[in-house]
Amino acid sequence: MRNNISREALDAVKAHIEKEDPILTHNKNVLAFEQAWADWVGVKYCVMVNSGASANLLTMAALRELKGEGEVIVPTLTWVSDISSVIQNGHKPVFVDIDPATLGMDIDEVLSKITENTKAVFLTHILGYNGLNQKLIDELEKRGIPLIEDVCESHGATFKGNRLGSIGWASNFSFYYAHHISTIEGGMICTNDEDFYETCRIYRSHGMVRESKSEAVKQKYKDEYPDLNPDFIFAFPGYNVRSTEINGILGLTQLKDLDGNNELRRRNLKLFLENLDSEKYFTEFDQEGNSNYALTLVLRNPDEALRDKVEAAMREMGVEFRRGLSGGGNQLRQPYLRKRFPELNPEDFPKVDHVHFFGYYLGNYPTLETEKIKQLCSVLNRITA
């Protein structure tokens, strides 16, 4: 991967720092980036935080506050913070296998695991692929179950022309190194629900009511707790996960290049998959609306000899790769879940187990040369078990 922060963005930070008395903590640039991101995604409200993991954490805290504790259906292929945030907020994760074409959750399995205790479906859009379909959206709406989208790896991907992150009750983004847009560290929570928005704003800054933008919310707490200083009423057991002006400036400066860069990412993925040997490697990924984060390489069959030769060839070429695809593969094989849920068998989820052992992601970025992609495919295609 490569750092996606442009020289123009760094110069904008430099210009701000060189002001006579620059404000560096959360201020006008963060607010401006929140509004710009809301406009770009297509939602009413955004809350910027210091990481995508913090976005997950606050989203699950707000879910608990507004909907109560219960079951949250989660993918077996995702980043650790999606599942840890569920556990940390008192919810019970319910796991489902993946759809190989999207690397997202198997939608039929999601629907089969909904119970009267289901509080939300927390779906991850993996590595730039769209993980939604209309059947899931319609069924969740019919049953009154919130859909929460993790879009940390899929900025700009779409479903039926709408940007991912604008479809569910809430969504989370990450602006970490090499993501589609980077603010060094950073994350964003998006929603059209005002109550959810105000709850996240309060949770973001120590649980302080004064962080709410709603005068009605602030007045409610003033009336209910007249013995407290209105500036220091702590409604929730909150966190301090605010961002900074530097992060806001970086986001604002780079947002204008995001759509163009995503076109290049899509081009790179298409070229990669078209040039791979489809007898050795799985190439039937659903590319509709994708905004590829990383090139996806999955062996078609569970062939350990071929796998070992593929890894050796990539190391020899100096190609960096991550086995297991997103988040280190099957999360049920990770210690933090094995210790907590020893009764769950990772092998009961065979499709994610396949990519755990025989799937990889490789760096993709807008300046990646097409000749390098073709050269890599040529080497991979010549490998025999």
Image: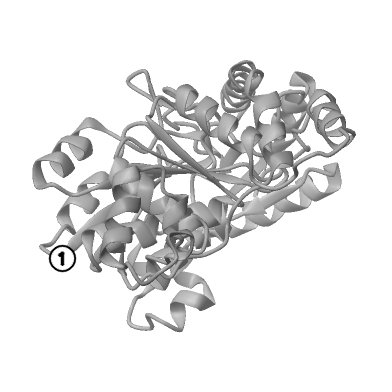
- Residue 116 spot, x, y in % from top left: 10, 63
Compared to residue 70, the image places residue 280 above or below, namely above
- Residue 247 position by quadrant: top right
Is residue 106 visible to us here? no
Three-letter code for the amino acid on which mark 1 is drawn: Asn
Q: Is residue 185 above or below residue 331?
A: above
Give the residue at x 59% y 26%.
269
Could you say whether the residue bearing mark 1 is in a helix, strand or loop?
loop
Pick the front one: 329 or 384 = 329
Task: Give the residue number, with chain letter if any, for mark 1.
Answer: 117
Q: Position of residue 156 (x, y in %)?
A: 50, 26
Please name the residue shown 21% across and 36% down the image: 137
Find residue 316 and report its horizontal and vertical position in percent.
85, 47
Residue 305 sits above or below residue 48 on the image: below
Q: Left or right: 249 with respect to 97?
A: right
> Residue 50: horizontal and vertical position, in percent?
61, 52
